[in-house]
Amino acid sequence: MQPMSWGRSRGVLGAFAALAVCLGVAACGSSGKSSSTLTIGGWGAPIDEATQKAYLNQFDSENKLKSQIVDAPGVQLARVEAQNQAKQIQWDAVDSLDGGSAYTLYAKGELNPLPAATKARFEKELGGQKVTPFGFSHGSLGDVIVCNTEKMKSCPSNMAQFYNTKEFPQQRMFGGIEPIEAITTAEVAAGMPITQTATTPVNVKAVIKTLEGLKPHIKVFWQSGEQQQQIMRSGEVPLGIMWSDRAYQLISQGVKLKVVWADGAYEPSYWAVVKGGKNEADASKLLEFIASHPKSEAVWAEIVHDSVPNPLALNYLPGSIGSQLADNPVNLRQLATPNFLWYAHNSNELNTAYENFLRG
């Protein structure tokens, strides 16, 4: 089975533009939901199908519940905010909410914090890097260095080399969206240890200066996973930063690529409980179910080919899939986690600086 990437496009403006469309309650989810129905804000196909098959069928049966998924690809943040503005919370949980959005909602008090005992249990089962004050990572990937081995004799082995345009003068592609992940690569290239990126406040001027040094060698600032693949498949550039799942999908199609995980940016998504939902207790039980069922996580990962948090899930996956996942310990220990908590409080500053960098 070839990877079925879900084509995330996590721009800085899309979710907020969708907010205006979503202020009407009916537009944000199903109305008239009974208290026995667990409503989840999802990503659409194939994520919804994987979540239903891997988790909800068994969870609903065991708990005598009925779960429903509301498609909200790329606009989960906007819809949760709209429901809060309307004071009518219709969702109980969110499935694979991107890191910047998740931390933003948590900072605004719109996601439930994990009870201390639950958080400790998740950290023990999943590992501390995958657990936040509000949930755990799920559907994650890496922003990694990728080289076309037919066009390059050698490939950068870390992010400092990727940013070294004298050693590697080739034209590149780089992210034109997701500034928090993009600037994390710049922090590491400038010498910050990957163990410190998640907790160090971003020096916006410094990272933009680092990016300015790379910019003359960036031919394309990509806007989506599809564009990444098109550019690398066509040979327009031989080198770039790509989403790991998209790179491995190209490899499965015969494109000669090398993926370098060292110093990449960890791009997590999160399961979390929406604060004020009608079924907070059942939503919390669903998160505990997912975290403690590695075999079910493996079913999900084999469908979607993105990461799941429980390390035991690797025991139920073909090695060819498990080795490609960001949460595989071999890969995860090489990735820098962005400072999403800083971003939640400073997103306007960074987004503006990054857009000015792109336009300048």
Image (spheres, rainbow, N blue to C red):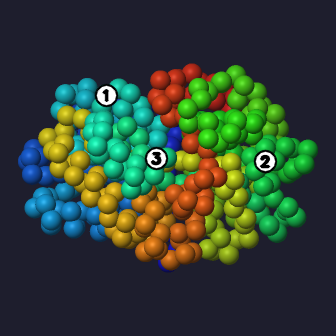
Residue 31 appears left or right of 197? left
> Disc 2 marks which residue?
162
Q: Is residue 55 above or below residue 276?
A: below
Residue depicted at 78% across the width and 55% down the height: 157
Amino acid on which the number 1 mark rests in the picture:
Gly
Q: What element carries label 3?
A: helix
Quadrant of the rendering where the C terminus is positioned:
top right
Question: Which tag, 1 or 2, sits closer to the chain's start?
Answer: 1
Looking at this view, is 92 or 234 the one in front?
Answer: 92
Question: Which tag, 2 or 3, sits closer to the chain's start?
Answer: 3
Q: In this view, does 254 lie above or below 172?
A: below
Amino acid on which the number 3 mark rests in the picture:
Gly
Q: Is residue 292 visible in this depiction of the protein?
A: yes
Residue depicted at 80% across the width and 54% down the height: 156
User: How far apart are the alpha carbons under marks 1 and 3?
Assistant: 22 Å
Residue 254 appears left or right of 238? left
> Disc 1 marks which residue?
109
Amino acid on which the number 2 mark rests in the picture:
Phe
Looking at this view, is 171 or 129 the one in front?
Answer: 129
Crowding at mark 2 (Cα within 10 Å: few <14, some 14-19, many 20+): many
> Disc 3 marks which residue?
128
Disc marking residue 302 = none
Crowding at mark 3 (Cα within 10 Å: few <14, some 14-19, many 20+): few
Residue 271 appears left or right of 202? left
Q: In which quarter of the image is residue 77?
A: top left
